[in-house]
Amino acid sequence: PYSGSSSLFREIQDEELKKFCSRISKLLQAEDLGPDTLDSLQRLFLIISATKYNRRLEKTCVELLQATLGLATCPEQLQVLCAAILREMSPSDSLSLVWDHTQNSRQLNLVASVLLAQGDRNEEVSAVGQGVLRALESRQPEGPSLRYLLPIMAKVVVLSPGTLQEDQATLLSKRLVDWLRYASLQQGLPHSSSFFSTPRARQPGPITEMDGAVATDFFTVLSTGHRFTEDQWLNVQAFSMLRAWLLHSGPEGLGTLDTDDRSEQEGSTLSVISATSSSAGRLLPPRERLREVAFEYCQRLIEQSNRRALRKGDSDLQKACLVEAVLVLDVLCRQDPSFLYRSLSCLKALHGRVRGDPASVRVLLPLARFFLSHGEAAAVDSEAVYQHLFTRIPLEQFHSPMLAFEFVQFCRDNLHLFGGHLGTLRLSFPNLFKFLAWNSPPLTSEFVALLPALVDAGTALEMLHALLDLPCLTAVLDLQLRSSPAPSERPLWDTSLRAPSCLEAFRDPKFQGLFQYLLRPKVSGATERLVPLYQLLQPMAGCARCATCPGVLLSGDPGELAIWGPPFPWASQPRGRPEPAPHGPGSLCSVLSSQFLALCTLKPSLVVELARDLLEFLGSVNGLRSRASLVTSVVWAVGEYLSVAYDRRCTVEQINKFFEALEALLFEVTQCRPSAALPRCPPKVVTALMTTLTKLASRSQDLIPRASLLLSKMRTLTQSPATGSMHREEGAEAICTRATELLTLLKMPSVAQFVLTPSTEVCSPRYHRDVNTALPLALRTVSRLVEREAGLLPG
């Protein structure tokens, strides 16, 4: 079953996997590990990695995979596959790999990757870290190559910062200084040369810059050449782990700085002058020397990024290195403020250079993070930086998935730093939603986490409508790209969908106001009625992006949705927004109904605070069938929380007004005959209305006669032949049963109030556990009262 590729696209059962592992075990025991072994290991890795749950492999197979990984004569490709399979199994108790310094560095790298994937179950991380440190301490040429071990050290620092002792951290800082600052400026020798090659031909050439010029300063990751030496590779890897190591070894890492406490001098003129003295650079302690070298390295990267790269790949590398360099400078300035004054001039110049370059837009995020952290101390106009960041970038670069993710992550990670700039972020939410509209669903979870910080009472209503209009915004962004005067070589839109009428409407000046409202960069303070726009965009409903857009983003944690209370009544009003599946589990009304109940449970006083809006909402029967779930939720919330027990502001007058509104609504939905214009009312709505009316009557006993009369009519109505056309048999029976039960309860007002409006003590867990006051006992007592209708009689 494993000879064909079709077997990879179906679920592999445990019995099949067991047979496959047996076959692999035989292949791994053979002397010649040929192409069949390679193909089988590739298939096994695909099976293991493509399964959501953990797969258990045969013990013999696991042992052979570990043995193959440690075999010195095994081809590297097979060892890489063995390590990948073992990592997918991790964490696992069946693994018995150990760190062996006799292995070559490539094997140590693979073994370490498996051990680190174990998650430090048996202190594997510490063992790996100590093994790498021993290799660092031995400068013997025949020792393991650090080129393959340094990335492991970088991961150890992140996973287990306490692994390194003080002297070991000092040693690593010294080695990083050597690799970053003193790598060779000559290219490496060819791997092999022919017998007839001359010594002159084998001479290595000099390292060059991105623009082809010969390098005159020290080697960095942006230096170019045909071949690199060992120390040059270590230079690149040292820079890749530099930021993590600085965070680990700084004041908040392994202790304090190497010098005495300089808290009184930080930021002073004396500290700036002393820090800028280059003659004392080599006399600094190892960690401070590393910071100084890191600063020089980042400065050189910024200078190199200004050179014009000869290849596109080099240009992309320049931008990636700029991002990392700014992040490293941010760490340096937070650890030692003296670096701040030395960094400002070049970073201001860098910001001025990249802000007008669309290709360098990702560099603006770490720059903004830097100014957010240090803008006040450096007297930088951070407001201008953020205005550009939140206004221009989402508007022009919403179609970049990588930038969209990094932008939202930037907002989430730096909320604690925004301070006075948080208002700028909140007012720019229409622009941020462009990222969400174009890049959902992958970005949906990130926005769900960010939304609570974006919303406030002043913008909640507009934001709610913006969330509901996300599919429309997606369609408009698609049209904007299609009508762009300079389209990209690779279209960013769905080329299979053609909507010429939508494009014509997008260019029509008559509709420009509506389109521009959806594309607005900031809060407008008002909500437009976009019914004409919804009709124009109907042909775009087949667009894949519009179909996957999260129009139900509001289904989040109720604890984070308290601010959404006021907008709900307005959001529930029909605005002409297309609603293809009004009864589906993910429909707009379903989401609003469930979240409205969650809001009221979280804050019961909302019912009293929104009394006027809820009465207005309940005053219309139009579209009741398409909004049945929402109407039921609102009616239930009124009956549950319109009580003095939940809000002292609740008055008898309010209870009477809601009773009259619900009485009129119940009369309309039960008296009107179904038609094409007015479909049949669901029985669930009718029973909810009757129950809520009974609850309100139990709280205002003057309403009991009206409620009893209404319930009697409902019971009679469901038994009449004409009701058959309005409700099915089971629906009519449910309505009749509920009316009878409620009518019996109202005959004893005190019992009705106890059952329909229980006190807080009754709802407490103790009331359900205590044998003498348990709720089942109370219910049995009430049942006997209801059945006998004449008090407590012996059974």
Image: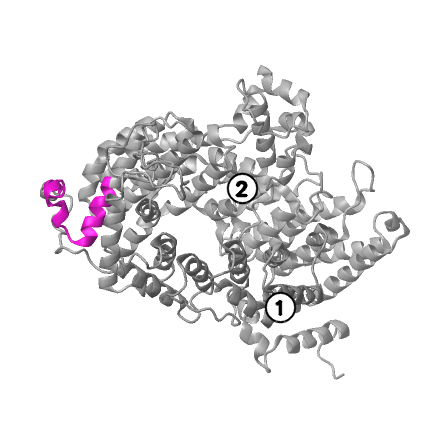
Circle 2 sits in a helix, a strand or a loop, which is it?
A: loop
Magenta segment boundaries in residue numbering: 272-296
Q: Nearer the viewer, mark 1 or mark 2?
A: 2
Confirm whether residue 523 shows in the render: no
| Mark 2 crowd level (few <14, some 14–19, many ≥20, 10 Å Cα) | some
CA gap between label 1 and label 2 equals 33 Å
Describe the colour scheme in one phrase.
Answer: one colour
Q: Nearer the viewer, residue 625 or 329?
A: 329
Q: Nearer the viewer, residue 202 or 586?
A: 202
Q: Give the amino acid at mark 2.
A: Pro
Q: Give the amino acid at mark 1.
A: Phe
Residue occupied by mark 1: 754
Please indicate whether residue 89 sits to the left or right of residue 306 in the image. Answer: right
| Mark 1 crowd level (few <14, some 14–19, many ≥20, 10 Å Cα) | some
Residue occupied by mark 2: 567
Q: Main SS of the magenta segment?
A: helix
Q: Which residue appears at 26% of the width and 36% of the height?
A: 300
Image mark count: 2
Q: Residue furthest bottom?
A: 794
Where does residue 244 sit, x and y in percent of width and height?
Answer: 33, 52
Where does residue 24 sit, x and y in percent of width and height?
Answer: 63, 63
Q: Is residue 287 magenta?
A: yes
Where does residue 335 sit, x and y in percent of width and height?
Answer: 23, 49
Confirm whether residue 416 shows in the render: yes
Please indicate whether residue 770 sits to the left or right of residue 230 in the image. Answer: right
440 vs 140: above or below: above
